[in-house]
Amino acid sequence: MTTIITMDQNITTVPANTPTIQAIGDVLFSDKFNRAGQLGGSAGDLFAGGTAHSWGGTAQAANATAVTNGGQLTIGAAGVSSECVDMGRPDVTLSMKLLSGVTSIASGQNAMIEMRKASAATGDTLRLTMNSYNSVVGGRVDLYKRVGGSATIIANGPGWKVGDVLKIDLKGNRIRIYINDLLQNDITDNSILTGNFFGFATSSSNRPWIITDYIVRAN
């Protein structure tokens, strides 16, 4: 038996906390960093759409934004830091454009793109780490998984040159890395991290690098 409920009028006000459904490819969050000051505590400018979120984490002074060429993020001077945004889900497609690569980087993990991180400040994470930049091959990005404070390499990634758009597609156990929409790595990792935080991290040996057009899409 089916019960049919009718109303005399339309619902004009959506109740608070009503969930929304995003289609694959919908922009969840975007930031061109078109502002000055520290990244930590600032809100994304949503240049490509999405929902307002603020960056949070640790050592906020290590990352600063500068208004140049329409907006850019300089991931700054040497210092341990983590700045991330809570996307509320582990499966997303993340992209960004490189404006300046890492020079003379020290050995070890220093300049890092954090994905599926357990919290804005610390915790288990997938990360892309960058090697020293040169004009021929760019700066290679390698995929690591950090669990319980220990990082293990999953795959050597592609070279990322100034002007290139790096895209990382995360869907369940599949991780795909693209440069300018050309597939570079297709990785299966069955030990799936489920953190919802995405952003950047640095170590005490970090050297500055610059990006723009940070976009997170539903996957």
Image (tube, rainbow, N blue to C red):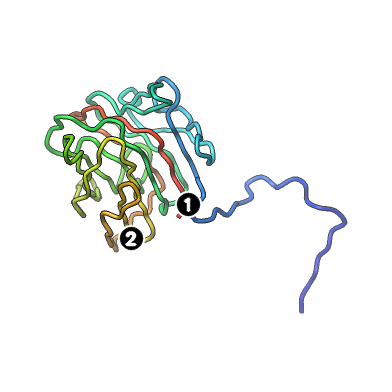
Characterize the local packing of mark 1: few (<14), some (14-19) or many (20 or more) Cα atoms within 10 angstroms.
many
Comparing 25 with 22, the one in front is 25
Whether residues under marks 1 and 2 lie with C-beta atoms below 8 angstroms apart, the answer is no
Residue plotted at (16% across, 35% down): 134
Residue plotted at (41% across, 52% down): 90
Comparing 169 with 154, the one in front is 169
Helix, strand or loop at disc 2?
A: strand
Give the amino acid type for the residue marked by disc 1 in the picture.
Answer: Ala
Q: Which residue is mark 2?
A: 174
Kindly give the residue lying farthest to the bottom in the view shown.
Answer: 1
Q: Which residue is mark 1?
A: 218
The image quarter containing residue 7 is: bottom right
Residue 218's x, y, as percent? 47, 52
Helix, strand or loop at disc 1?
A: strand
Question: Does 3 appear above or below 191?
Answer: below
Q: Is residue 17 left or right of residue 100?
A: right
The image quarter containing residue 72 is: top left
Give the amino acid type for the residue marked by disc 2 in the picture.
Answer: Arg
Residue 102's x, y, as percent? 21, 32
Residue 192 circle label: none
| Disc on the earlier residue, 1 or 2 | 2
